[in-house]
Amino acid sequence: MANKNISTLEEDVIALHKVNETFFNVCFSSPPSMEFGGNWDDVFKSLVPLVRASHLVPLLELQIVVIFVITQVTHHLFFKPFKLPKVISQIVTGILLGPSIKDKSGKESLFPFLSQDAIGTASVFGYAFFMFLTGVKMDVGMIKKTGHKALTIVVSSLLQDLKLLNSELGRLGLSSGLVSDMINVIATSTASFIRVFMATGQPIYKIYRDIGSLIAYILAVVFIIRPALFWIVKHTPAGRPVKDVYIYAIFLMVLLSGVLSDMFDQTVLLGPFILGLAVPDGPPLGAAIVKKFDCFFSGVFTPLFVTICAMKADLSSIGDDRKLLTLDIVLLVVTFLSKVMASFVPSLICKMPFNDALAIGFVMSSKGVVELASYSLFHDYKTIDDQTFAVLLVSVLIIAILVPSMVHYLSPISVNALHLIELVGRASPVFIAHHIHEKVTFNVHFSEKVIGPFNQYQLNNQGAVSANIFTAISPSNIMDEDICTLALDKLTSIILLPFHRKFTFDGSIESDDNTRRALNSSVLERAPCSIGIIVHRGHLRHSSSLYRIAMIFLGGRDDREALTFAKRVTKDPGSFSLTVVRLDAEDGKTMNDWEKVLDNEVLKEFKQKSVANAHVKYIEETAKDAIQTTRILRSIMNEFELIIVGRRNGLDSPQTLGFSEWSEFPELGVIGDLLVSSDFDSNASIFMVQQQQQLKGTNGFEL
């Protein structure tokens, strides 16, 4: 121990460090220094040696920066183009910085032994807060509404990465994942109690004390903390943010809950997760907590935790025990297939389509971060050896690559085209599935013009699109039943309907079909999915070769749904350009706070795309009344070939006040009706979108 210099606040500590079955002494100062160990003039000479191992805080900051940079670079260069989740790049970063890669010169300086406790503690702290935020986002009441499918099937981050969170498949997977997570929490707690009793040999009274402490903590959360949180919600004025003092108090409670969990021999993750479940979801409190902390902890500390877990694995240890390696691989394959089948078979029994059932099986078999945290915990407890942990890490990596790829493969765009023909001269309706009756002779010459274009569309997009064509011959007053029944049977995401009025290329009216208008209105009222009505007025282009699309965004569920479909055109920037025009009221108060939060979340990703893509634009305009709204729309309507709007049925706002009183086509919504009216001299086509309405079926379940 050279150059010993001990102040009144420091002392040298001798630790035993084990390398290759050999113990040796390691000396370090405690507490660590908070300053850099060199001069700033030396920064450009050598950055890593500048931060000595004894100066742990600056070293920790440098480690976090290095991990963040490598993770982001690997994700955007290698994995994002293939739509793979970020957890893959985080694991790969851990492998690159861990003992698997034998280039130790730089890594030992950046990640010395003395810094492992500091960065390990920081990562666990971040993951504990991530679990708290996960609990905050969960709606515990959803368990009562999951239905028999979710409870039988027994994964929010994966579904979000796959862009399936708002789909029927995503909602079912999310509900099932919630049930699974609650069962997992109970199982983990039970296993922790057994480990303490069996492994440490502690007396039985301590087990009872730990169980009693856990029960007391849960009761305190349910009967003291949760009512206090509801009191905060009640005493927060409508439209006003939650006071910061409450947010900071909850932050301290999260830290205290982790300490209490450790005191009664549980992982530090349990207490924060239970506390998170007690927080009322949504605005004002739940939304405020998520808005303030989610970006920081989910974007920095959770990736740090995953990377640190992966850094514990030494892939070079794989193969040290070939018999154990074979056993590990067999068990992993059997376990994975069992998990897939455990969700796939019940889904089939519940009469889900084969592809959707298989996709649910893959989604529910992948937990990513959660499984990696469990494996890391087992490794820390010496329950599994180094080789088994390395194999498990590789399995998490493989599954993280396999599952998104399989789900994307099993969920192609499926187009179901229904040709409706009014029943004339027949006694009973006829329904023809052309892909089923291909070899059966039918007098279906009336559908040839429909079958040909859709077959060509499928051929041009082979592997990405499947097209099924149907013909329904039925009375006009029950055609809506044919449409809705087919949509429900095929789990359709959106029904596209043609507007009842046809226009010529010069904008004049060619024909009106009131029967078709009545059909559209009936489908809007009872459809089991989203609805889109297309007002086709030609494909007029200017000098630009791009098909120019605009989306008018005022806010609300229909506008969010319309924006979701509009964003799909950004995947083909060479053919389309998209401009989103947000019309906001002068005071910014067009709807309640929760709706505004949802609007901002949907727009946030689009704003980021508009910065990186020259063919994507985002414009904000202020319209204090309907007159200004009309003026803004007139100024932009001739710049586009297609304008997308939400129906916003039943929503009143200052920007549209008075429009509904003289609306000619309420099925298009007030903005769509305004753009179609004869007062607007425009040849742009209109696409109106209405999000699925919550309807009650005859069995009492929500459709």
Image: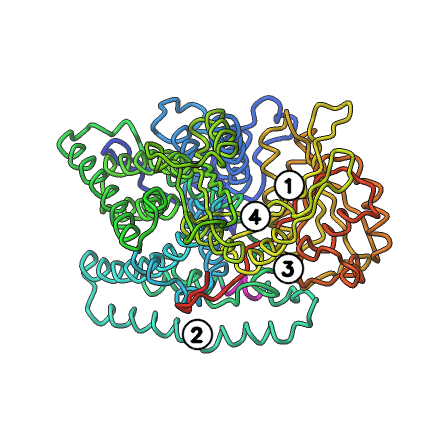
Residues at discs 2 and 1 in contact (Cβ within 8 Å): no
Residue under circle 2?
222
Q: How many marks?
A: 4
Answer few, some or many: residues within 10 Å of disc 4's Cα (few below 14, many 20 plus, some between 14 and 19). some
Please state which of residues 509 and 702 is positioned toward the viewer in this rendering. 509
In primary-sequence order, the first of circles 3 and 4 is 4
Find numbered disc 4 in the image and state the secondary structure of the residue it sits on.
helix
Three-letter residue code for mark 3: Glu
State the image coordinates of residue 147 (x, y, percent, origin top left).
Answer: 37, 63
Find numbered disc 2 in the image and state the secondary structure of the residue it sits on.
helix
Answer few, some or many: residues within 10 Å of disc 1's Cα (few below 14, many 20 plus, some between 14 and 19). some
Tag of residue 52 = none
Seen at 63% across and 24% down, the residue is 574
Residue under circle 1?
606
State the image coordinates of residue 364 (x, y, percent, origin top left).
Answer: 34, 48
In primary-sequence order, the first of circles 4 and 1 is 4
Find numbered disc 1 in the image and state the secondary structure of the residue it sits on.
helix
Task: Find residue 551 and report its image quarter.
Answer: top right
- View extreme (front): residue: 425
Answer few, some or many: residues within 10 Å of disc 3's Cα (few below 14, many 20 plus, some between 14 and 19). some
Residues at discs 4 and 2 in contact (Cβ within 8 Å): no
Please state which of residues 376 and 72 is positioned toward the viewer in this rendering. 72
Please state which of residues 652 and 14 is positioned toward the viewer in this rendering. 652
User: Can residue 164 be seen in this snapshot?
Assistant: yes
Residue under circle 3?
595
2 or 3: mark nearer the eye: 3
Seen at 44% across and 26% down, the residue is 462
Alpha-carbon span between mark 4 and mark 2? 28 Å
Magenta residues span 249-253
Three-letter residue code for mark 4: Phe
In primary-sequence order, the first of circles 2 and 1 is 2
